[in-house]
Image (cartoon, helix red, strand yellow):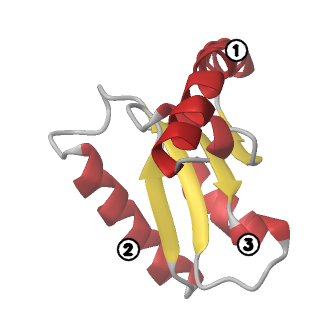
Amino acid sequence: MIDHLRRQLEGRPEILCAYLHGSFLKGDPYRDIDVAVWVDPTRRGARSRAQYALDLSVALHVALRCPVDVQVLNDAPLAFRYHALNGHPLVVRDWEWLDEVRARIWDDYFDFAPFARQYLREALGA
């Protein structure tokens, strides 16, 4: 199934990279396959990020006969980008570009993480 998913994603030139993440990757029981994609905004067309993700989810569901949850990474929350990019790469068009993107995201995440943990402790009264 992963090879079929990879081929479907490789056929979309607007996808700069795609990652498999979530319960399917961990081997846990799953209801859908979680895929995160970084999309070239100049090739996405006039569709919004949400509409693009929905359209791709439906197309992959039809092709794989299994629900696929697609999220666009371009402007997703930092924590989601960090965790998704720690998943399994399915498509990478340019490893040098991806290494730079991941380094920036990881730097930002680890700069922000202590503040987020402190905020949660205070908010939860722990």
Calculate the distance from the C-alpha at mark 3 to the C-alpha at mark 1.
25 Å
Identify the residue position indicated by label 1 in the image.
103
Which three-letter amino acid code belongs to the residue tagged 3?
Phe
Q: Quadrant of residue 42?
A: top left
Q: Residue, x 73% and y 72% (percent of image)?
A: 24
- Under circle 1, the secondary element is helix
Mark 2 touches mark 3? (CB < 8 Å): no
Q: Nearer the viewer, mark 1 or mark 2?
A: 1
- Residue 20: image x %, image y %? 68, 56
- Residue 2: image x %, image y %? 75, 67
Q: Residue, x 21% and y 39% (percent of image)?
A: 45
Mark 1 touches mark 2? (CB < 8 Å): no
Calculate the distance from the C-alpha at mark 1 to the C-alpha at mark 2.
31 Å
Residue 58 circle label: 2
Which three-letter amino acid code belongs to the residue tagged 2?
Val
Q: Which is more toward the observer, 103 or 9?
A: 103
Whether residue 27 sits left or right of residue 102 in the image: it is right
Identify the residue position indicated by label 3 in the image.
24
Q: Nearer the viewer, mark 2 or mark 3?
A: 3
Residue 50 versus residue 44 in the image, above or below: below
Q: Residue, x 38% and y 32% (percent of image)?
A: 75
- Under circle 3, the secondary element is helix
- Residue 17: image x %, image y %? 60, 37
Residue 44 circle label: none
Q: Residue, x 42% and y 68% (percent of image)?
A: 57
Calculate the distance from the C-alpha at mark 2 to the C-alpha at mark 3.
18 Å
